[in-house]
Every structure is written in C-alpha cells, then in structure tokens.
C-alpha cells in the first residue's frame, strides 16, 4: 500500500470517519499485518502528543491574555526590568513552552525517521519474493490426483491420512546423504508441523526437521519412514568453493506438481543487497522452486534457490552451497550426539550430456509439502 494512502487510512480510522464495514476490514488488516498495526499505534501516540501540545499552548495563551487584561485594568502591574534580568524573566516565563515545543519537534523527527525506516524495510521486502508455493484448492486436487493416489496405496502410509489433504505449502529439497538426509530452505518448512517429501518416481515419505539455520535460510530434513532404503552412492557432489561469474548451471524443482527443469548462469557473486552468503542468478524460477539445487556442468551443487527479484524478470537468488558445510559444522557443535551426515562426493554426472545428467539427478530431488 502506498505510504501516503496508508497514513490517510490510519487517520480516517483514528478519527472515526470510516464506515462500520471499512473499520471491520481495516481491523482485520491490523491483526494480520504487524507493520500496519505498529503504524496505527505510533500515529495514535503522535496525535495524542500534538493534542497535548495544542491544549498546553491554548492554556498558555489564555494565561497571557488574562495577564494582559489585568494589567490593562490596573489590577496588577508588571515591574520594569532591563538587561540580563529581563532575559532571565523571559526564560523563566516561557522555558516550559519552549521545552514542550522542542520535545514535540524531537518526537516528530524520531517518528518520521522510524516511519521512513519501516517503509524502506517494507519496500525491500516487497522487492524480494521467496519461492515457497502456497497450495490452493485446485493445486491440492492436482497433487492428490498425481501423487496422493500413490500415497493412498503405499503400505508405509496407508494407515495415515495423506498430508496432501491438509498441506498448505510446497517447496523443493534434495538428498545430501543417502541415509535420508535432505536440504531445503528454512522458509519452506518454518510454518510446517507435518512434513512429507516425494520424488518424481512416486516414492513419498514422512520427514522431520533435524536442524535449521535462519542466517543462510537452510534446513536439514530426515526421512523417518522405515520403508525408505538407503542410497549408497549419490552421483553428484557439493561444491565448497565459490563459483565463477558466468558459470552455467541447471536447476530442478517443483513449481508444478511434476519436476521442472531450468537453466541459467551466475550473474553476480553476491545476492540481494550485497548478501555475501548468496549468488544472483539469471534463470527462470517460480513459487515451489525454493530449496531446489543449482547444479553446474560437472555435476556439483553450487547453490540452493531461495527467492527472486520482484522487479526484474529472471533475477533469482540462491544460497551458496558452502553454507551446507557450515551448517553441518554448527550442527555438530550444537549437538555432539547428532548423527554423522556424510555429504556426497560422486562425479557420476561429469562429462555426460545434459539430458542424462537430469535423468540421473531428478530421482534425488524431492517435493516438500506440509502444513
């Protein structure tokens, strides 16, 4: 919402000029949008400050008029004071008014600065779109038709209610250890209590969160279904070093109910607003791609897709793959009993044509659905 329009709306709300329907709608917006609620609170405080100052100023003006009237009628007489004594008297007489005026001016300056910061932060957030996909009723029906039927007949899930019936969000993940450990974005699973993952072969499993790293927007998941069989050799590796500007890659993810391929190149060595933990990529990506791997021609994962730029087509941001190793180190430090996660070091994708690379890679990329 435009800042001036929002301020005008808040003033109408506080002054009681809204219709009952408008007021009810605006109060719902306040409940769901902390920034709007904060602006209402700050604006209320601001208006109360102005009202208090106005009342004080009116009272002072009344006193001055009364004093002048009394002197004019000869009831009181003002002593003749000159020089420094006169300045002291004037200061004593008006120091409180000046202090109030200075306080109001400072308050207005601080409030204006706060509103500008809040607005600028909101503008930055509006420029940055995370690629977690929200399930609508139509999408749920599509997943239920394409994937849910397999879950209904799978022996390890038959006794459970398919999460597709209740899932709200969709993202992407990929295996980093054949024992069932996957990486995705933190923002993908941050609102999920129940999580399942499924690949393009129709294999679907329940999973749980092992560790999260909000700073790099990463999370580790673990497949918990006993029917999952450990994969001995993953055909790819995870790159520890930074990638070069212009390096080409391909992506796999779930912006649709089936796996989708994309290709592009590294267009900047830092992410949004100079973020050194991420890359800027030129590639097509849509909600559902969050958590998907970015794979170079040598079969190395160089990043994990996180978001896209709202104002520039094809500008996407990806967390650098070296953050996976940093997160695993932090997990070991935080929990000495944590299981050993062995990242892949395979080179089965190196030197083969792209279509074969995709065929070998896609079964290890999983859709993440939860609520």
Image (cartoon, rainbow, N blue to C red):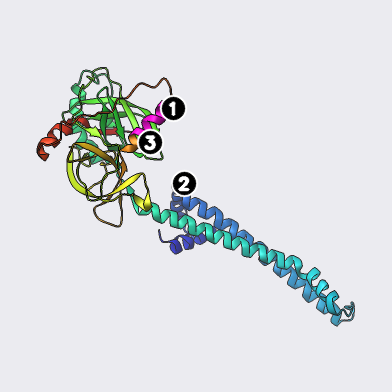
The span picked out in magenta is 325-332
**Residue assigned mark 2:** 31
Using residue 84 as the reference point, say whether residue 52 is left or right of it. Answer: left
Judged by depth in the image, the label closer to the viewer, 1 or 2, is 1
Task: Give residue 190's mark.
Answer: 3
Task: Residue under label 1, please give it.
Answer: 333
Looking at the rendered image, the disc whose residue lies closer to the viewer, 2 or 3, is 3
Question: Which of the marked residues, 1 or 2, is nearer the chain's N terminus?
Answer: 2
Let me know if residue 330 is in the magenta part: yes
Nearer mark to the viewer, of 1 and 3: 1
Q: Of helix, strand and loop, which one carries label 3?
A: loop
Is there any visible trace of residue 204 in the rendered image? yes
Could you give the CA–CA distance between mark 1 and mark 3, rounded to whole angstroms?
A: 22 Å
Labels 2 and 3: the sequence-earlier one: 2
Q: Cα distance, mark 2 to mark 3?
A: 20 Å
Q: Quadrant of the N terminus?
A: bottom left
Q: Which mark is residue 16?
A: none
Image location of residue 354, percent across then percent down:
11, 40
């Amino acid at each position: 919402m435009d800042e001036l329009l929002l301020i005008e709306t808040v003033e109408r709300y506080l002054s009681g000029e809204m219709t009952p329907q408008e007021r009810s709608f605006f109060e719902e917006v306040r409940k769901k949008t902390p920034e709007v609620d904060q602006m209402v609170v700050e604006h209320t405080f601001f208006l109360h400050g102005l009202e208090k100052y106005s009342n004080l100023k009116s009272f002072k003006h009344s006193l001055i008029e009364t004093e002048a009237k009394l002197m004019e009628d000869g009831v009181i007489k003002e002593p003749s004071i000159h020089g420094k004594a006169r300045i002291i008297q004037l200061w004593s007489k008006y120091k409180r008014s000046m202090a109030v005026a200075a306080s109001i001016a400072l308050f207005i300056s601080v409030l204006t600065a706060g509103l500008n910061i809040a607005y600028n932060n909101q503008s930055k957030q509006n420029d940055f779109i995370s690629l977690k996909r929200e399930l609508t009723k139509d999408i749920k029906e599509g997943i239920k038709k394409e994937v849910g039927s397999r879950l209904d007949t799978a022996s390890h899930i038959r006794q459970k209610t398919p999460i597709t019936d209740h899932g709200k969000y969709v993202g992407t993940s990929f295996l980093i250890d054949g024992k069932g450990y996957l990486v995705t974005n933190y923002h993908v699973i941050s609102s999920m209590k129940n999580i399942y993952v499924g690949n393009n072969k129709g294999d679907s499993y329940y999973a749980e969160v092992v560790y999260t790293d909000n700073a790099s927007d990463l999370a580790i998941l673990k497949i918990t279904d006993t029917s999952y069989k450990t994969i001995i050799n993953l055909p790819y590796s995870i790159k520890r070093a930074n990638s070069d500007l212009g390096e080409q890659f391909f992506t796999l993810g779930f912006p649709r109910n089936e796996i989708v391929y994309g290709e592009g190149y590294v267009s900047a060595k830092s992410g949004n607003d100079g973020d050194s933990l991420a890359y800027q990529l030129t590639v097509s990506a849509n909600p559902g791609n969050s958590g998907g791997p970015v794979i170079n021609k040598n079969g190395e994962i160089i990043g994990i897709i996180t978001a896209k730029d709202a104002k520039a087509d094809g500008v996407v941001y990806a967390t650098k793959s070296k953050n996976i190793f940093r997160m695993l180190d932090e997990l070991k430090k935080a929990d000495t009993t944590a299981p050993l996660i062995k990242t892949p070091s395979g080179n089965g994708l190196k030197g083969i044509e792209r279509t074969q690379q995709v065929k070998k890679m896609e079964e290890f990329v999983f859709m993440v659905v939860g609520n």
